[in-house]
Image: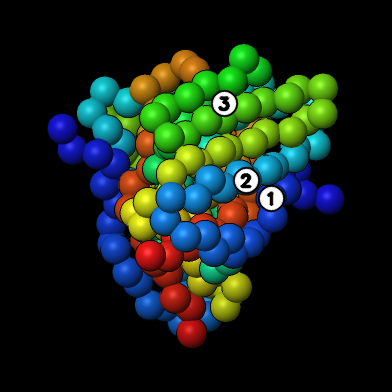
Amino acid sequence: RKEVEQDPGPFNVPEGATVAFNCTYSNSASQSFFWYRQDCRKEPKLLMSVYSSGNEDGRFTAQLNRASQYISLLIRDSKLSDSATYLCVAYTDKLIFGTGTRLQVFP
Amino acid sequence: DAGVTQSPTHLIKTRGQHVTLRCSPISGHKSVSWYQQVLGQGPQFIFQYYEKEERGRGNFPDRFSARQFPNYSSELNVNALLLGDSALYLCASSPGAPLETQYFGPGTRLLVL
């Protein structure tokens, strides 16, 4: 079983749609959690950290449920520029990445 | 400010050869980590260095080695290359504690023929 699991997608959504990505992690000792965004053939870039209280950055909302070992990312009012792969990440003593969920937003 | 830089950007090698990849962290950052990303997968942790000492090692064979220099730059070495070593090799730097805040360089794309 992978330490961080994500639905690989792809998620194909129209502009303006709301899309949600889910992720589970297996190591209960994981201390911190993140969502990274990776564009095709580019490096991952930190999108946001994830906290139990939930956090929001503009159209993006991330949530952590430690009891269920579950992380989510919600994107509202999707833009064409949101098309990318979204990587769920857990940190113990190193960053553990999920496989990534691919999002394609179409006009 | 310059971000994390890596060299070379692309590399083609043949099986059995050796390769050295280089990384310069963001100015002031003291930690460097290396990751391997094969197509369709997330990055896999290889090594982490902090203040020139190895702080972590992933599940990679001994053919993979790394070091960090006094100026905090780093090298990743891979010996006896296999076809399966073809991947994007990413370097990430951290300012220090906490080490989980990492910024990635553009990567070196390695193709082994």
Chain letter of the residue beneath label 1 in the structure image:
A
Q: Position of residue A40 (x, y in %)?
A: 40, 63
Residue identified by numbered label 3? A50
Q: Is residue B102 visible?
A: no
Give the residue displayed 32% in from the left and 26% down from the top: B29
User: In the depicted view, which residue is nearer to us: B36 or B113?
Assistant: B36
Dot 2: within a 10 Å radius of its alpha carbon, few (fewer than 14), some, or many (20 or more) residues? Answer: many
Chain letter of the residue beneath label 3 in the structure image:
A
Chain letter of the residue beneath label 2 in the structure image:
A
Gap between marks 1 and 3 measured at Cα: 16 Å
Q: Are marks 1 and 2 in contact (CB under 8 Å)?
A: yes
Q: Position of residue B38 (x, y in %)?
A: 55, 65
Residue identified by numbered label 2? A21
Residue identified by numbered label 1? A6
Q: Quadrant of the C terminus of chain A?
A: bottom left
Residue depth check, mark 3 versus mark 2: number of the one nearer the observer? 2
Name which residue type carries label 1: Gln
Element under disc 2: strand
Indicate left or right for A95 with B95 as reference.
Answer: right
User: In the depicted view, which residue is nearer to us: B76 or B2?
Assistant: B2
Q: Which mark is residue B90?
A: none
Q: Are marks 1 and 3 in contact (CB under 8 Å)?
A: no
Name which residue type carries label 3: Val
B27 w.r.t. B19: above or below: above
